[in-house]
Amino acid sequence: MRNLFSVKYTLVYILLVPFINWTFSWALIWEILPGWAFNPVTIITGLVLVFRDFSQREIGHRVLIAMFIGLCLTYMTTGADLALASGFAFIIAELVDWALYTFSKLRLSSRVLLSSALAAPIDTSIFLFMAQAIVPGAFTTPNITMSIIGKLVGAFVVFIILRSRKL
């Protein structure tokens, strides 16, 4: 049996899922220019994709169970509508992410970057489209763009760190 320290990334991953969904439900949408607004919380959501990769490294395919636990916590903390939007986006994007991470023979650093690059646009588009019923104005080109860029910047930083460690 694993101790809690050996699954630290998995625990962070599980807790990030409801935390990010909870913050999304109350964060204000910033209007930078007329018609160019975004939700600043979408920038930090890239952490979920990166922590999912590290979680899979810790617990293998059981990462899908961790994803389910995170979604259950989202349901309990934010309600059914946001959990459904998050869950649907996660199921599709995380499975794409999981498949690339599982079947690719690339270095860890490259898998993290490539899996985030594929999953981020899918996750963002689906989630923001469904979440606009909860947060009006969420599904906008600027919000989608800023969210994807935020996710990719986070993944790129992790890529650089891992690459410097020869992983």
Image (cartoon, grey):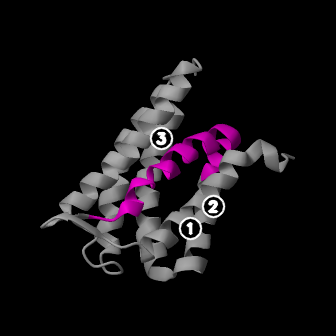
Where in the figure is residue 57, as x and y percent of width and height? 64, 37
Picture residue at 41% right of the left edge, 72% below the top? 27
Say few, some or many: other residues with alpha carbon within 10 Å of mark 3 (under 14 / 14 to 19 / 20 or more): few
150 or 50, nearer to the observer: 150
Which residue sits furthest left?
Answer: 34
Q: CA distance from mark 3 to mark 2?
A: 22 Å
Q: Where does the magenta region start and end?
A: 38-63
Where in the figure is residue 118, as x and y percent of width and height? 35, 42
Q: CA distance from mark 2 to mark 1?
A: 6 Å
Q: Which residue is mark 3?
A: 99
- Counting residues from the start of the chain, the first of labels 1 and 3 encountered is 1
Picture residue at 32% right of the left edge, 66% below the top? 128
- The answer to the question of whether label 2 and label 1 lie on touching residues, with beta carbons closer than 8 A, is yes
Task: Please state which amino acid type lies under the numbered disc 3.
Answer: Ala
The quarter of the displayed image where residue 85 is located: bottom left
Where in the figure is residue 111, as x and y percent of width and height? 47, 31
Q: Which residue is mark 2?
A: 15
Q: Which residue is mark 1?
A: 18
Give the main secondary structure, helix, strand or loop, of the magenta stretch.
Answer: helix
Q: CA distance from mark 1 to mark 3?
A: 23 Å
Tell me, for residue 146, which label it has, or none: none
Q: Is residue 81 magenta?
A: no
43 or 167, nearer to the observer: 43
Say few, some or many: other residues with alpha carbon within 10 Å of mark 1 (under 14 / 14 to 19 / 20 or more): many
- The answer to the question of whether label 1 and label 3 lie on touching residues, with beta carbons closer than 8 A, is no
Say few, some or many: other residues with alpha carbon within 10 Å of mark 2 (under 14 / 14 to 19 / 20 or more): some
Q: Is residue 108 visible?
A: no
Q: Is residue 44 visible?
A: yes
Q: For mark 2, give the secondary structure.
A: helix
Q: Is residue 44 magenta?
A: yes
